[in-house]
Amino acid sequence: MKIDRAGLPFIAGALVPAALLASTRRYGWGTGFAALGAFFAYFFRDPDRQVPAGEGLVVSPADGRVMIAGPSDGRWSPPGSWNQITIFLSPADVHINRAPVEGRVTRIEYRPGKFLPAYRQDACDNELNEIWLDRGGETIVVRQVVGVLARRIVCRIAEGQTLERGERIGLMKFGSRMDVFLPAQSEILVRVGQHVVGGETILARLHARAAASYGH
């Protein structure tokens, strides 16, 4: 399995002391650092995913558990009427982020903020990165939101770039949350509490007319 390059400094930062400690026969400490290196390798794992085919499908942008699935109440969403799906990522989940739909990146906005637990209602004030996608004239918004442990958002796409559904777009380090805002006409296909897999689980289906317009 691949390991994302963002994890290499963390892995090396644990394994180098582990090797030095082992060389001086301080095996207890060395084992601890080796275990930390193994955790970092596990955290930054980057498995390949089988992205489902089909018109108008919205796939999960991350692994995790669904916290919100339904109409947005306006506290979290951009201005307007949206359906919202929010996914909480624990440290045990794969943290690679993926594009939920195919489309063109029209806007990327980083906003500094707090580092509250990602599952709290006021986590909308946390540091975040907001990605706006245009898919055949419809807008889908994806937010990378940090939590208590996540202190850095990695975004590897640029405005004007065209993405494929399920394409890797970045990651968040050490626990976080992702919000997906969809047109109000979209059909949500997941429920609160469901565990989803990034790039594979179908979250929703876009309105048929909008889905058909893509590519025309």
Image (cartoon, rainbow, N blue to C red):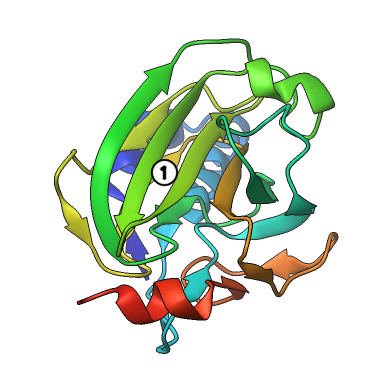
| Quarter of the rendering occupied by the C terminus | bottom left
Please state the horizontal and vertical placement of residue 6, each as a whole percent of the image: 31, 39
Residue 161: percent from left, percent from top? 15, 50
User: Badge 1: how crowded within 10 Å, few (<14), some, or many (20+)?
Assistant: many
Task: Say which amino acid is labelled 1.
Answer: Leu
Q: Viewed as shown, does residue 42 lie left or right of 211? A: right
* Residue in the image at 14% along x and 44% along y: 160
Q: Does residue 11 appear in the picture of this structure?
A: no
Q: Residue at x 75, y 25 (%)?
A: 117
The picture places residue 57, in percent across and down from the top left corner, at: 49, 77
Camera-side residue of 173 and 84: 84
Is label 1 in a helix, a strand or a loop? strand
Q: Is residue 61 above or below residue 102?
A: above
The residue positioned farthest toward the left in the image shown? 160
Q: Quadrant of residue 120?
A: top right
Determine the residue positioned at 25% across, 41% down: 106
Q: Which residue is mark 1?
A: 171
Locate residue 167 relative to residue 43 in the image: left or right. Answer: left
